[in-house]
């Protein structure tokens, strides 16, 4: 504990350095600007029910054709609301959404997706930051405007029952996709699918805008749960999760801007929210479309990591606000920014306020050496503001910051952070302009004790 207190005291006595910091009022103004700019979808006042097109709830009958027919009917009408009444529906294949459409899952709905890969046609997607063609996500849309998924129903991806077995087989295709990224292989030649074992996302929208995903429950995803790729103007709120397979990120935002995430109850097997922006050469080539202008607030956190940026962030991540969230249960890491020398790009202008954690391994972790791989493309991490964070226990290290010697983590402000118990206090290397104000790890020191009479006698 003496070593721990010494490390913290070194930080506290750093001089207060001047770099851009927003006041509470300025911060709220920025948040309001983002939220007010986000457009909710406009859905025509037309309603159809999947029951009218042959869907058979609470039976083994495949209802995919009924869903397809209902969506085609809506498309002819210019869009509208597809109502899925209470019941369990078997779907042997994906739901492909259209513009101007709301998919409404009534209370008591369970969409139970099949696990035959041949039922999921190849579509444009990305896999861990590289654009390619792969099996369709279970719910998918590309180049859409005005799209909503609402209601309190549940989507079950049956990931554990089948897709989880692909995890151990994916590495050859994963490495092949990364070679294609580095070699700028034409997109049309990046064909995966059968024999590749790259699991599909549960819900993915691509090149889409004016999005609402509200109140649904997600269970047992094959891979990432919700993935917005190259999207703009999205609201995700009131969601809940029970999904604990490998790589079951709750929400992944990639090359995506103007997003509100609020009132979400996470319970998933990997990152709760991960902000990404493409991988390596391909990501850097898309630097004009960073992930930016993102607000996350009032969420209940549970999973592997709570809030993450990276590791695929080569086009850059900026202007992100996280507020008023609370974790329950154990998290490996609370706040986690991860890059490596393959990535390049930047992480900047990140504001995190009022988060409460129970037990973590590491509360706050910035690393420029994720997986210890890469060379030649150091990322720039700067202008990070962390305020009002509490944690009951960090079984590893409370605060870890790892910059490059030639590209330091710069302009980092840690204020009002209390970790009641930690195995190790801080591990901070290769930084510039780190300001710490009211960082307490362990017990807060009180008034200095007076010299004891036994000491006076010895003197």
Image (tube, rainbow, N blue to C red):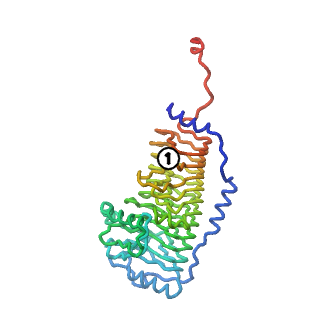
Compare residues 270 and 289 and report the one nearer the observer.
289
Q: State left or right for residue 123 relative to residue 411.
A: left
Residue where numbered disc 1 is placed: 402
Crowd around label 1: few <14 · some 14–19 · many ≥20 (10 Å) = some
Q: Is residue 38 above or below residue 383?
A: below
Q: State left or right for residue 12 relative to residue 244.
A: right
Q: Is residue 103 above or below residue 422?
A: below
Give the image quarter of residue 290: bottom right
Q: Residue at x 49, y 47 (%)?
A: 402
SS for tag 1?
A: strand
| Count of residue discs | 1
Question: Residue 284's spot in the image, x, y percent?
Answer: 50, 63
Question: Residue 197's spot in the image, x, y percent?
Answer: 32, 67
Compare residues 130 and 309 and report the one nearer the observer.
130
Give the image quarter of residue 444: top right
Q: Given the current orientation, which residue lies at the most extreme bottom position?
A: 76
Compare residues 313 and 115 and report the one nearer the observer.
313
Query: Which quarter of the image is occupied by the C terminus?
Result: top right
Q: State left or right for residue 261 relative to residue 375.
A: right
Q: Residue at x 56, y 73 (%)?
A: 210
Q: Is residue 127 visible?
A: no
Give the image quarter of residue 417: top right
Q: Is residue 144 above or below residue 36?
A: below
Question: Residue 409's spot in the image, x, y percent?
Answer: 55, 49
Question: Residue 95's spot in the image, x, y percent?
Answer: 42, 76
Q: Is residue 54 visible?
A: yes
């Amino acid at each position: 504990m003496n070593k721990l207190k010494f490390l913290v005291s070194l930080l506290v006595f750093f001089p207060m350095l001047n770099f851009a910091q927003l006041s509470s009022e300025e911060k709220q103004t920025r948040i309001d600007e983002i939220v007010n700019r986000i457009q909710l979808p406009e859905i025509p006042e037309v309603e159809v029910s999947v029951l009218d097109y042959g869907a058979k709830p609470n039976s083994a009958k495949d209802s995919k054709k009924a869903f397809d027919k209902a969506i085609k009917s809506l498309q002819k009408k210019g869009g509208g609301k597809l109502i899925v009444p209470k019941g369990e529906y078997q779907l042997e294949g994906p739901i492909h959404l259209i513009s101007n459409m709301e998919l409404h899952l009534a209370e008591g709905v369970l969409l139970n997706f099949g696990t035959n890969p041949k039922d999921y046609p190849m579509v444009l997607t990305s896999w861990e930051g590289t654009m390619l063609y792969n099996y369709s996500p279970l719910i998918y849309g590309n180049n859409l405007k005005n799209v909503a998924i609402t209601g309190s129903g549940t989507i079950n991806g049956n990931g554990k029952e089948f897709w989880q077995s692909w995890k151990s087989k994916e590495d050859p295709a994963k490495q092949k996709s990364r070679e294609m990224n580095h070699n700028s292989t034409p997109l049309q030649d990046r064909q995966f699918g059968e024999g590749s074992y790259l699991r599909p996302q549960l819900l993915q929208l691509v090149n889409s805008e004016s999005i609402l995903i509200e109140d649904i429950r997600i269970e047992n995803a094959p891979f990432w749960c919700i993935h917005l790729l190259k999207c703009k103007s999205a609201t995700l709120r009131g969601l809940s999760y029970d999904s604990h397979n490998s790589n079951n990120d709750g929400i992944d935002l990639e090359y995506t801007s103007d997003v509100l995430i609020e009132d979400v109850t996470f319970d998933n097997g990997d990152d709760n929210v991960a902000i990404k922006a493409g991988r390596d050469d391909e990501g850097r080539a898309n630097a004009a479309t960073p992930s930016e202008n993102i607000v996350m607030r009032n969420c209940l956190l549970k999973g592997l990591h709570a809030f993450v940026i990276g590791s695929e962030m080569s086009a850059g991540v900026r202007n992100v606000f996280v507020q008023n969230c609370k974790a329950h249960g154990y998290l490996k890491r609370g706040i986690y920014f991860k890059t490596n020398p393959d990535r390049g790009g930047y992480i900047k202008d990140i504001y995190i306020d009022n988060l409460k954690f129970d037990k973590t391994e590491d509360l706050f972790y910035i690393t420029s050496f994720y997986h210890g791989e890469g060379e030649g493309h150091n990322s720039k991490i700067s202008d990070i503001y962390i305020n009002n964070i509490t944690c009951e226990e960090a079984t590893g290290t409370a605060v870890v910051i790892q910059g490059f010697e030639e590209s330091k983590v710069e302009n980092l402000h840690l204020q009002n952070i209390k970790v009641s118990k930690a195995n190790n206090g801080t591990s901070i290397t290769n930084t510039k302009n780190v300001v710490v104000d009211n960082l307490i790890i362990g017990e807060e020191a009180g008034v200095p004790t007076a010299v004891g009479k036994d000491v006076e006698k010895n003197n």
